Amino acid sequence: MTISRRGALVVGAGLGAAAVGGGYAVATHDKPEPEAPPSADAKGHPLWRNWSGVQHAYPAARATPKTEAEVAEVLKTAVAPIRPVGAGHSFTALAPTDGTLVSLDALSGIIAWDGDEVTVAAGTRLGALGPALAAKGRALANLPDINNQTLAGTLATGTHGTGATLKALHGDVTALRLITPKGETIDCGEHRNTDIFQAAKVSLGSLGVITQVRLRTTANRRLDRKIWLEPIEDVLASAEARWARRRNFEFHAVPFTGLAVCISHDETDAPVIPRGPDQAAVFLDTLKGLRNLLGFSPPLRRAAAQALLSRTKPERAIDEGWKLLSTQRPMRFNAMEFQLPVGVQLKALAEIVATIEKERPDVFFPIECRRIAPDDAWLSPFQGEPRGSISVQADDRDEFAFLYTLIEPIFRRYGGRPHWGKLHSVSGDQLAGLYPRWNDFLKVRAKLDPDSRMLNPYLKGLFGV
């Protein structure tokens, strides 16, 4: 049974057998699905919701422009606030608007090649971009871990993968085309309109609409993926060495188990070992069942988890990187993620795990821990220095206010920068203290959008407008 990279964290068929056929029954007394908002508002505007359901809106208009000229016309004439939207995987209120919601789904595909650089329409989904590049023998150096995001949305939020020498996706952007709220088209890059370029690479969709992006590519190589289970103490002791020697390395600490799942990817010429069926739901259902049955007793819960997981074996898959690095999530959740200075990342993680195990027996999602190389985009969480990423998640049926009251104070105390697409309450002057080019970004934003047509209430609060 093959293991998925991110959501599954299933370390072998033994866990699935133990969970459903080895004497352990997953409890069924889960909370009901959160009640959905009405399908339309009083004016008949249909509902829009993000992937997890935590954000929703009733846009007065929706636009799916098919050309750049149509994008420009929408930005000049549409009802504001105008908000671009992709897959809706952001948990923050970046997309909601009672004005105009703009989808770039019709602007998709590879536009041109220039040597090893490729120009891609910004509405292209990452899941479609991987095979399109592979057909030319090329690939992106790294990928974030969810493949149905659009290229534009990935850049806007600074979304990333893992690897101490590998940048977030926006770090490989060499040029882009931006259409402003005035309908003007601006081509910018490393040697042209550089201030706008550095602002636009990670812009939260606040400068206008990016319609095409030029990216550096690398040779399409096979990766050897290994997934294995270790005591969390051993993982913390060896993590820095593994980040130093592995192409991609991450680990996921599993609260109330004393364990962590390690995931590595390294280049190889070995024959393909295809990934098998994704067993993410089995693993997460098992953790949820342990919580439901034994949440009243952390020692019993820990003992039961270790007994189940001790039956598992390490897993391996070998294939082209785009097939292994990105996947889809089987269970919905809400998440908070911050990027911390590398020197305090593991200390902060240990404190977060201890806090959850003391205060929140309802949590069962693993906590993701990754490492990302620095870049120079003004609002990149990795601007100027490498950062360590920690992501804490809660099932979409569960209360998640604890992320703000218990977890965010830890992130802030250690100098963390928030992931723009994940839950956080940092804004205004607080962000200015975290991003050296924050005020420079605000000046570019005000110049390109003086009437704040791209700003919904959330972004106005974020930028102090």
Image (tube, rainbow, N blue to C red):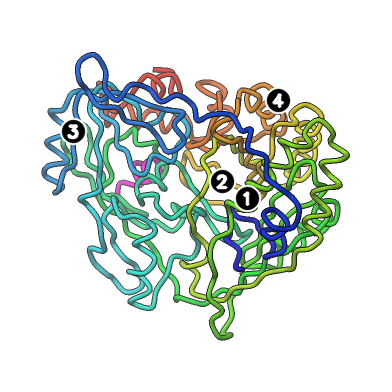
Q: What amino acid does circle 4 point to?
A: Leu
Q: Position of residue 86 (x, y in %)?
A: 33, 43
* Residue 341, numbered label: none
Tell me how far mark 2 sits from mark 1, CA to CA: 6 Å
Q: CA distance from mark 3 to mark 1?
A: 36 Å
At horizontal 55% and vertical 25% (from top left) the residue drawn is 426
User: Relative to residue 48, is residue 279 depicted above or below?
Assistant: below
Disc 3 and disc 2: Cα gap in Å? Answer: 30 Å
Q: Nearer the viewer, mark 3 or mark 4?
A: 4
Name the front one of labels 3 and 2: 3
Q: Residues within 10 Å of mark 4 (few under 14, many from 20)?
A: some
Which structural element holds mark 1?
A: loop
Q: Tell me which numbered mark, 2 or 4, is placed earlier along the sequence.
A: 2
Q: Quadrant of the N terminus?
A: bottom right
At numbered mark 2, what does the secondary structure look like: helix, strand or loop?
loop
Q: Are marks 2 and 4 in contact (CB under 8 Å)?
A: no
Label drawn at residue 406: 4
Give yes or no for contact between labels 3 and 1 (Cβ–Cβ under 8 Å).
Answer: no
Give the mark nearer the N terminus: 3 vs 1.
Answer: 3
Instruction: Name the spot of residue 365 as percent of width and height, x first.
Output: 65, 42
Residue that label 3 marks: 75
What SS does tag 3 mark? Answer: helix
User: Is 318 located above or below residue 313 in the figure?
Assistant: below
* Magenta-tinted stretch: 192-200
Helix, strand, or loop for circle 4?
A: helix
Q: Nearer the viewer, mark 4 or mark 1?
A: 4
Residue that numbered label 1 is attached to: 386
